Amino acid sequence: MIRGGKGAARGGWRARAPIALAVAACLAVVGLAVGGAADPPGGFALSPSGHWVYSPEYGMAFHVSGGGDRADAQVSLPGAGPGPVVQGDTSGFVVGPARIVEFGKSSLTVEGSTPAPADERPVTLEVRGGPYAVYRQAGTVIRLGEHPATIPAGGPVATPVATGDGRVWLPRTDAGLLCALPEQADRVSCPVALPQGHHGLLAVVADRPVFVDTTDDTVRPVESTQLGAPAPLRVDVPDNAQIASTDVAGRLAILDPGSRKLHLVDPTGAAVGPVTVGLPPGDYAGIESSGGVVAVVNRTDHTLNTFDSAGVPRDRRPIPGGDGQPPLVKGGDARVYVDGADGAHVMVVDHDGGVSEVPVAGDRTPDRDQQTQQQPPPVQPPPGTHPAGPPAPAVPGGDRKPVVPPKKTPPPTSNAPLPAAPPGAPRAVSATAGDGSATVSWGAAAPNGAPVTSYLVSWAGGETTVGGGARSAAISGLSNGTAYVFTVVAVNRAGAGPGVGSKAVTPRAAVRPPGRPGSLAIEATTKHTWAKVTWTAAEPNGAPVIAYHVHWTRDDGTREGSVTLAGSARTYTIEDIWDGKDIPFTVTVTAENSAGTGPAASAHKAPPS
């Protein structure tokens, strides 16, 4: 709330944050990932595109491409929901009330499930290192994907936000703390303390977290261990206010549901005042930013309303799918998605403010033409009677002959084909690693009105194109020991469809048995009965040498023996090989690895003279 004497608060943040701030733009296609070091994730990652929605009626999850107008992939998951669906690089997750079901985005099959930690609808985040499901009342964070973990937050949390480096910020405002969960961390730290008795909300501006203080109506940058200097908001922000998780072209978007106002505020405290939009009557709940516009939901008339950063209305659309409180979800591609209550419709708010509705499961009502053409059969008159007909019209000249009405020609029906659309997603994309190579395989993509002419296979460092009838591609020239994810995109004359990535595979050199030990030599003197054998390391051929086998035998067959030594051994002393008899002997040494035993090195020793 605004209070006297607080309006003059200024901060040094103005010099550190630009007035116009940009948020993340559209990123990768579905499943696209970049191969890097053998232990991903590295310092560079692309976010999944599009949005998955679960339909309890169909028992299926449908994928909607962010820029498309139809569902381009689906997976059968009976009984998985209802609940939100989040995605990582290679898997999607239906976060239901009792369990979380994982499915592969390339295989489109169920890959596992885990119990949900609490009976509440979590806040989901599609960010680097995730995705995440945050159970606010239970104070539990579930990290899904390549490095799954269940992480306690230490108490209930408010709505979380995330930055581009994969760090999730969790406000524990009741405890006066702002907590952070870095990418791949297994515990939460709470390095930032709030001013005594203050409450508020978190948002991200220019990929930096900020704290909107509803106690003194200021905004402060969140530093690594403390809050920065406050800047005045110049609007009254009540405790029940809601805020978009990211900025709208550099402005904070704050919803005051009680007074039905939308505030668009410069977070730097610059002289440019806030923009306040009076909203039509209704019950408003839910606000989110797609970067260029902000979207809010009116639950009274069940509409989605969008505004640009200047407060100018951009669109107003009814939300399909029946009653209920549709959640506003920010996808990994920074678009805003609104799921219909029936799970069969999705509304997409693009970065430029465009809103589109996608009926993911199609129209379930019967075909109207079939309804109108299904007429009941005519009733037959009893035998010997004739149905009464209309009187014949009079004909000039006195003749009363019936006039046959002209035969009506039905209007022509249009058989024009539907316009072609880009293909659907390739199915069951997989990769098998070889020696500096990989083989990528996939199933056919839906042509969507035009034949698939080619498939584009891409990876970190290259791409290749194969024909539309191909179902695999051989990739060479890869680096052994480096993990690669391969993305397959189908192309037809209408364009390129969504890409689907394989799971990461790591090429490695082919493992063969070791080579022959080198420089085998035998040292023996007339003063001793023993012989010292030495050699140099054998070539490992793709796997470490785990053992050396030394065997010796006298030429007359009266004495022989063998020993197995560690892979690090380079010498062995044979005791009593002469035994008072000057008989020549032969020594062989072989190396062994996981692929087997290699060829022997051999040396013959005559008695010392």
Image (cartoon, grey):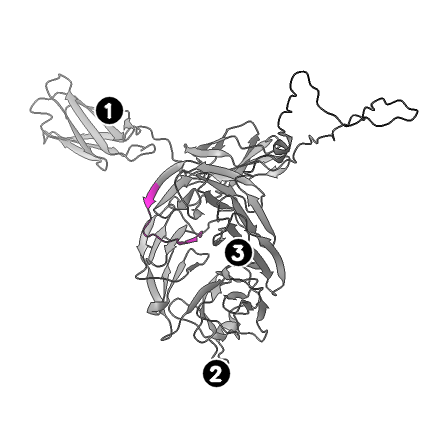
Q: Mark 1 to mark 3: distance in Å?
A: 67 Å
Label 2 near label 1: C-beta < 8 Å? no
Q: Please name which of the two marks, 1 or 2, marks the residue nearer to the observer.
A: 2
Q: Is residue 326 magenta?
A: no
Give, as a single range, the part of the protein colored magenta: 113-127
Tell me the residue that label 1 is attached to. Answer: 602
Which residue type does callout 2 highlight? Answer: Gly
Q: Residue 414 appears at what percent x and percent y?
A: 70, 31
- Taking 274 as reference, is 239 left or right? left
- Classify 10 Å Cα crowding around label 2: few (below 14), some (14-19), many (20 and above): few
SS of the residue under disc 2: loop
Image point (86%, 27%), residue name: 394
Tell me the residue that label 3 is attached to. Answer: 24
Q: Quadrant of residue 421?
A: top right
- Classify 10 Å Cα crowding around label 1: few (below 14), some (14-19), many (20 and above): some
Which quadrant would the C terminus be assigned to in this image? top left
Q: Quadrant of residue 404?
A: top right
- Classify 10 Å Cα crowding around label 3: few (below 14), some (14-19), many (20 and above): some
Q: Is residue 270 visible?
A: yes
